[in-house]
């Protein structure tokens, strides 16, 4: 299975992504992740969830090869799957701590941007390569991590930034060596796990309630442009170039 749930300690659940080679999740895995996050939050004794990954990086986004192979069916499926997984981080009844190793790209930003707390390994990088992949999306979530003009620069250039830079914007609780990442996340989780479960759940609900942006509706709005690019054929060349490991034609 690409997603598994473990009980790290009393009150602390871990949801782990393990989908080699780069944790680029297919349609089924996105929905599996959404179900796992929501289920962990519903366990009455859980007070916090740590979302982490095994392997070379946290999440490389969607499985572009699946979209190339299956077309519309996969694109619609992955759009809905991503929306479900990002919403599950947000709607999980208890706080979610994202522990980010290696690369955090595309859909990874959607997960991290909706998390309550983020810790990162010092080798972690964060970015939205969507413009280079013929898609749009998760700018909603990147906007929760960086200032507006940095957001626009990162979207237009498709550049990824290191954890050290992201930390300067106040978005990361800690930047640590990779060997210390899980322990650091669990250390923060243990502090939260010592709080009243009833109060924690109401705190999460109240913080979501005062958000200035409806992240779920905002992200679905972005996805409409992804589908427009797909229907007009512009996205096909970008995805094909990525799969074929060549330079894309950017004349249209």
Image (spheres, rainbow, N blue to C red):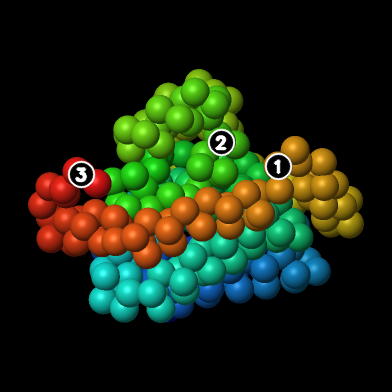
- The nearer-to-camera label among 3 and 2 is 3
In the rendered structure, find residue 143 and report the number of the disc placed on it: 2
Depicted 57 relative to depicted 230: above or below: above
For disc 2, the neighbor class at 10 Å (few under 14, some 14 to 19, many from 20) is: some
Query: For the residues marked 3 and 1, what is the alpha-carbon distance in whole angstroms?
Result: 33 Å
Say whether marks 2 and 1 touch (CB < 8 Å). Answer: yes
> Residue 234 placed where, x, y %?
29, 55
Q: Earlier in the sequence, mark 3 or mark 1?
A: 1
Which residue does the image show at 45% across and 77% down from the upper left?
Answer: 28
Say whether marks 3 and 2 touch (CB < 8 Å). Answer: no
Quadrant location, the N terminus: bottom left
Q: Earlier in the sequence, mark 3 or mark 2?
A: 2
For disc 1, the neighbor class at 10 Å (few under 14, some 14 to 19, many from 20) is: few
Which residue does the image show at 36% across and 48% down from the upper left?
Answer: 130
> Residue 222 placed where, x, y %?
53, 51
Picture quadrant of residue 15 = bottom right
Q: Identify the residue under disc 1.
A: 213
Query: For the residues marked 3 and 2, what is the alpha-carbon distance in whole angstroms?
Result: 26 Å
Q: Earlier in the sequence, mark 2 or mark 1?
A: 2
Which residue does the image show at 54% across and 26% down from the upper left?
Answer: 148
> Residue 138 placed where, x, y %?
50, 48
Residue 44 appears anywhere in the view: yes
Q: Identify the residue under disc 3.
A: 250
Secondary structure at numbered mark 2: loop
Depicted 143 relative to depicted 242: above or below: above
Secondary structure at numbered mark 3: loop
Instruction: Judge left or right: residue 66 versus residue 1.
Output: left
């Amino acid at each position: 299975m690409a997603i598994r749930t473990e009980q790290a300690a009393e009150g602390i659940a871990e949801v782990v992504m393990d989908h080699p080679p780069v944790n680029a999740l297919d349609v089924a895995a996105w929905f599996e992740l959404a179900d796992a996050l929501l289920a962990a939050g519903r366990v009455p004794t859980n007070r916090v969830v740590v979302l982490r990954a095994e392997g070379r990086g946290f999440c490389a986004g969607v499985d572009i090869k699946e979209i190339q192979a299956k077309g519309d069916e996969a694109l619609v499926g992955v759009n809905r799957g991503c929306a479900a997984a990002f919403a599950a981080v947000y709607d999980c009844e208890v706080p979610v701590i994202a522990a980010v190793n290696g690369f955090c790209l595309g859909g990874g930003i959607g997960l991290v941007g909706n998390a309550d707390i983020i810790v990162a390994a010092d080798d972690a990088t964060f970015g939205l390569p969507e413009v280079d992949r013929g898609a749009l999306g998760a700018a909603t979530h990147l906007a929760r991590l960086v200032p507006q003009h940095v957001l626009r620069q990162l979207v237009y250039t498709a550049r990824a930034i290191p954890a050290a830079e992201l930390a300067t914007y106040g978005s990361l609780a800690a930047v640590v060596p990779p060997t210390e990442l899980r322990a650091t996340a669990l250390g923060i989780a243990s502090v939260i796990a010592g709080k009243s479960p009833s109060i924690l759940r109401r705190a999460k609900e109240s913080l979501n309630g005062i958000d200035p942006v409806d992240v779920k509706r905002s992200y679905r709005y972005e996805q409409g442009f992804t589908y427009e690019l797909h229907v007009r054929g512009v996205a096909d060349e970008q995805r094909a170039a990525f799969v074929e490991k060549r330079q894309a034609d950017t004349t249209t």
